[in-house]
Image (tube, coloured by chain):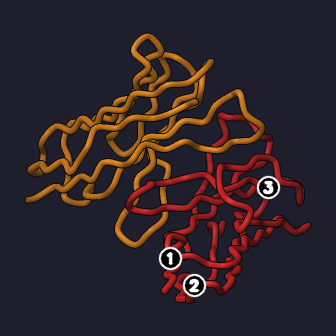
Chain colours: A orange, B red
Amino acid sequence: GDSVTQMEGPVTLSEEAFLTINCTYTATGYPSLFWYVQYPGEGLQLLLKATKADDKGSNKGFEATYRKETTSFHLEKGSVQVSDSAVYFCALSSPNQAGTALIFGKGTTLSVSS
Amino acid sequence: KAGVTQTPRYLIKTRGQQVTLSCSPISGHRSVSWYQQTPGQGLQFLFEYFSETQRNKGNFPGRFSGRQFSNSRSEMNVSTLELGDSALYLCASSLGAGRHQETQYFGPGTRLLVL
């Protein structure tokens, strides 16, 4: 079945460092891909998404490109801030289902220190 | 526009009891989905409702059920609670066209502790 694999955390960075969180997926067809972020004690917030191959999603300095050839959707940010400390989830929604159910990766915890 | 709201935010129950959680979607959204989040299993899809009908269902036992009302509000019920049902239960809403490109917007969750 469909699945999402994320790099294991935690990821610990200093402020202004470059961030990459790897995400690869297994799916039939062309799923939509999402990155969600979860701050302590809160629900999930959409960070960005891409719905077809070669699309680039971007938001708040974060970017991710839908790579069909490598089945990847890596999250990047050029300069992280302390406020970016959170758990990041990669997810997909398959076109082969009824509805919009999301399949999530295990999450990657990011900790940024000043 | 108000976001997705969930009530209650916290619950403590004992094994064998049942519990009902409530979710109000963003105004205009007609689809509501439920997810369970645990440290061991991560985020898992429970079910999705649209127009008062279950549109999709995850791999959970029949003790987990849900429903949707005509105003799109949704409830989920867990009967005969087990210790392993302790989790954060997240509700998400979307416009409801059922296309995989749709964004789901999440509420803050209900944290359930089963003793």
Relative to A89, residue A77 above or below: above
Residue nearest the observer in this picture, A53 or B91: B91
- Same subunit under labels 2 and 3? yes
State the quadrant of the N terminus of chain B.
Answer: bottom right
Determine contact: label 2, label 1, CB under 8 Å.
Answer: yes
Question: Label 2 neighbourhood size at 10 Å, few (<14), some (14-19), many (20+)?
Answer: some
Residue B71 screen position, x and y as percent: 87, 68
Between discs 2 and 1, the one toward the N terminus? 2
Give the residue displayed 79% in from the left and 69% down from the top. B73
In terms of secondary structure, where does tag 2 sit?
A: loop
Residue A57 lies left or right of residue A12; in this view the side is right
Instruction: Tell me: B18 left or right of B31.
Output: left
The CA span between labels 2 and 1 is 6 Å
Please tell me whether residue B106 is drawn above or below residue B80 in the rendered image.
Answer: above
Could you tell me which chain the residue with mark 1 belongs to? B
Residue B61 rendering spot, x and y as whole percentages = 68, 60
Residue B74 image offset from top left, x and y in percent: 77, 68
Q: Which mark is residue B15?
A: 2
Say which residue appears at 88% left-offset and 55% top-offset. Answer: B53
- How far separated are the C-alphas under marks 2 and 3? 27 Å
Residue at the spot of label 1: B83
Look at the numbered disc 1 and give the secondary structure of its residue.
Answer: helix
Task: Using the image, tell me which numbered label, if any, was put on residue B49.
Answer: 3
User: Which amino acid, by three-letter code, is at mark 1?
Assistant: Leu
